[in-house]
Image (cartoon, rainbow, N blue to C red):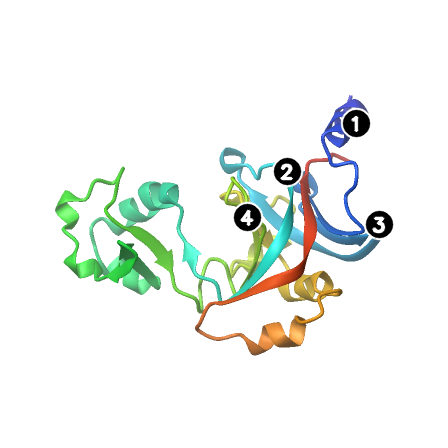
Amino acid sequence: EDIIANMERWRWMPIDLGDFFVLVNVPEYRLDVRSGETVRHATRVVVGKPKHATPIFSDEIEHVVVNPYWNVPLSITKNELLPASNGNPGYFAARNYELLAGGRVINASNVDWANVNPSNPPFRVRQRPGRGNALGQIKFLFPNQHSVYLHDTPSKSLFSRSYRAFSHGCVRVHNPLEFADALLAFEPHLNLSKIKSMFGSRERWNNLKSHIPVHIAYFTL
């Protein structure tokens, strides 16, 4: 039955995975960078919780973002941040969050918290780059309808666990700089040294000259 299930999953994979590609196997909590059948790099990952399962699909990595902002999804703002803050504007500042309305940063102390509708807040929330940012120091983007991507994380202890389904759907990478080094092997103008030179407090976008196929798959052993 497992073999039949895996054969069906393979049937929905692209026929051509690419000469150089990234493969994330969700139930194995593993990421590979591959050239054909050769594994150039492998590392552990954290994937989505059962109620926020990481979607299964293929795309292409187009951007590497250093010192990323975390644009908090509305569902997390509504269901987690607003209840936890309990109308205390200091909650957001203490966690390096900022509120935006109309594309501009607003002062949390100026919000009429007593009349904020948690289901439709008049602002969105993002976390500034820096220490404690939920995305760590780097993220790898492949724009998609699921708003899923690969990224660093400050929660390193989770990688030592055998069960690693703890995210809201994105894939957290254990060794993101080693992954970046392998990922950029054929990128002419970007390498690990340049990535490290960008570390700081300002978000830095890097567009890849060659887009790299990424396949998020589900294969049981």
Q: What residue type is labelled 1?
A: Met
Give SS at disc 4: loop
Q: What residue type is labelled 3?
A: Gly
Q: Which of 113 and 184 is in front in this view?
A: 184
Mark closest to the chain's N terminus, 3 or 4: 3
Cα separation between marks 2 and 1: 16 Å
Cα separation between marks 2 and 3: 19 Å
Mark closest to the chain's N terminus, 2 or 1: 1
Q: Can residue 175 be seen in this view?
A: no
The quadrant in which the C terminus is found is: top right
Q: Which amino acid does label 2 sit on?
A: Phe
Cα separation between marks 2 and 4: 12 Å
- The percent coordinates of residue 145 (x first, y second) are 51, 40
Residue 143, numbered circle? 4
Residue 36, numbered circle? 3
Name the residue: 52% across, 74% down. Answer: 199
Give SS at disc 1: helix
Q: Nearer the viewer, residue 207 or 54?
A: 207
